[in-house]
Amino acid sequence: MAKKTKSQLAAAGTKMDPTRTAVADAGGVAADGRMGKGGCDWHLAPLDEENLSRREQLTARIFTTVQVVLCLVLVATVVSLSMAGTGLSVDGLQDAFASNPAMAVSFLSACMQPFIAYLVRFVHSHYAAGDAGYAAANLIVLLCAEMMLQSMVGIVAMAILLWRVWHRGSQVMGDWRRGRGVAGVLVDVSGALVVLVVAGICLFARAQLG
């Protein structure tokens, strides 16, 4: 086997390496700069945007569609409040929420959807870069959050996205979890955890309202 040059070793595991091979030093630092315990590298080969397979083209379109649909959920909620006669003024919303607290919980749930769409955008970028473990883990947390928010649109959307990325994500989930460690995993899913906390508050409020 030919001895690799320093430039080849430096490129291994980065976007300059077409195979995105797992390379790490004795300290567990992956070649792309991530810290992995035991030298774990959880990256797959990044997707070539110019030569995507039909499956990945469809996946990319689904990601875009989901982001648009989630934003439209808030728009639809605002329109429904306006048609209900509450208006869009602060006083009108305060009166509506005071008379019907459940409406306030539903409105908060709808307000979370654009933020979830924002997170989905990051999930897709990581997935395309080969960080499929990150993508799958975040979608699992977001799916749980949508269940707690009781948003049927969000539940279906997250379930479809998870199904689309699972064939790649399942390959590296274990390595991603071991390589990142507990602290790293929490950092990677921190945005989704924020949504989960808010969803828990909404679920608790609904339970109290009966």
Image (cartoon, grey):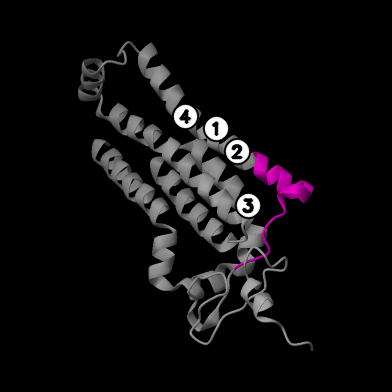
Of label 1 and label 3, which has the lower sequence position?
A: 1
Q: Alpha-carbon distance for marks 1 and 2?
A: 6 Å
Q: Which residues are magenta?
A: 43-61
Q: Are marks 1 and 2 in contact (CB under 8 Å)?
A: yes
Residue 147 x %, y %: 44, 45
Judge by depth and name the residue closer to the eye, 135 or 162. Answer: 135
Of tags 4 and 2, the one toward the viewer is 2
Residue 88 horizontal side relative to residue 48, left or right: left
Local SS, label 1:
helix
- In the rendered image, residue 25 lying in the magenta stretch gets the answer no
Residue 210 drawn at (x, y percent) = 27, 37
Return the disc, 3 or 4, that comes first in the chain's sequence: 4
Instruction: Please name the amino acid that badge 1 sits on.
Output: Val
Q: Amino acid at mark 2?
A: Thr
User: Which mark lies nearer to you, 2 or 3?
Assistant: 2
Residue 64's disc is 2
Q: Which residue is mark 3?
A: 163
Which label belongs to residue 73? 4
**Residues under labels 2 and 3: Cα distance?**
15 Å
The residue type indicated by label 3 comes to: Trp
Q: Nearer the viewer, residue 170 or 155?
A: 170
Label 1: which residue? 68
Q: Does 58 appear in magenta?
A: yes
In whole angstroms, how far apart are the C-alphas of marks 1 and 3? 19 Å
Image point 57% across, 38% down: which residue?
66
**Secondary structure found at label 2:** helix
